[in-house]
Amino acid sequence: MNDRPFRNCVRYWRTPLLPGADMVTAEYLDHEFAPHWHDAYTIPVIEAGAEMYDYQGSQHVAETGTVPVINPGEVHTGSRATEAGWQYRVCYVPVDFVQRLAEDIAGRAQPLPWFPAEAIRDADLARRVSIAHRLLEAGGDPLAAEAAMVDALSTLLVRHARNEPEPARLMADNPRVETMKARLVADLSEPVTLTDLAQAVDLSAFHAARLFTRETGLPPHAWRNQVRLQRALGPLRAGVSVAEVAAATGFTDQSHFTRHFRRMFGVPPGRWQSR
């Protein structure tokens, strides 16, 4: 039992044994993650305390010993569920890695694995995920670490994966949402107004904003900032300066970029880059 409040203390790291993945070892006292998404599968294990998060239209609590998986591209938040905060380990696993592993397990082509919205309450799985994460972080025997990682992820898939839900029947407004998305990402450094978006889809500003938010889970400006943050990760990994990345991805200045980056990743971009 933890007898002290946790700190806001985060370590991002990577391992060649899981190419393309980001790994996190962290504890949080009062940090709150703004609504955001990841391109990868988010696979955490709560080691102490409890986290509260909004996801798929409901509020959830992940207590010690649970594995609250977030599917790729799904908007979610994160904050403490107890006064002391929470401590966890997270693997952000690339979609193609999970897809290949699912197909290896089944011995044939598989649909994209999908996981339930509720935190997974499986003590044995939580133990396997925690052990794998610790071995990968320690950087010792690569054979043991990789075997533990494959064991943890395959256990997650076999016990808890479902098929990705069938897309809802396209409504008449879906092309409008896609048009607005395309307008927002065409040039991330170009200023775009809500009126610009509305005119592109022949709606009023009010109805354009309401439609976009309903379909994506975020208002247009927040959705665009999430795209900017995702596109910033590659250049940061390549060693491009924070100031250059901020300018290239369309943030007004470095402080603006840093503020949004920290709300999503829990650390400033400079610390994330120097992990």
Image (tube, rainbow, N blue to C red):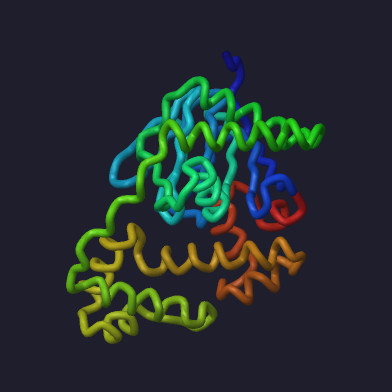
In depth, the one of 54 and 172 nearer the eye is 172
The image position of residue 95, as x and y in percent, is 52, 54
Q: Does residue 263 appear in the picture of this structure?
A: no
Image-based side of 236 in relation to 209, left or right: right
The image position of residue 122, as x and y in percent, is 45, 23
Report how many numbered discs are placed on residues in the image.
Answer: 0
Examine the image and state in which quarter residue 17 appears: top right
Q: Is residue 148 above or below residue 105?
A: above
Return the residue found at the far right: 140
In depth, the one of 179 and 257 nearer the eye is 179
Image-based side of 25 in relation to 169, left or right: right
The image position of residue 200, as x and y in percent, is 30, 85
Q: Does residue 5 appear in the picture of this structure?
A: yes
Image-based side of 85 in relation to 195, left or right: right
Residue drawn at point x = 61 percent, y = 66 percent: 232
Residue drawn at point x = 29 percent, y = 68 percent: 212
Q: Is residue 79 above or below residue 268?
A: above
In depth, the one of 230 and 50 nearer the eye is 230
Residue drawn at point x = 27 percent, y = 59 percent: 167
Image-based side of 192 in relation to 168, left or right: right
In depth, the one of 226 and 178 nearer the eye is 178
Q: Is residue 189 above or below residue 102?
A: below
Return the residue found at the far front: 107
Examine the image and state in which quarter residue 96 appears: bottom right
The image position of residue 234, as x and y in percent, is 65, 65
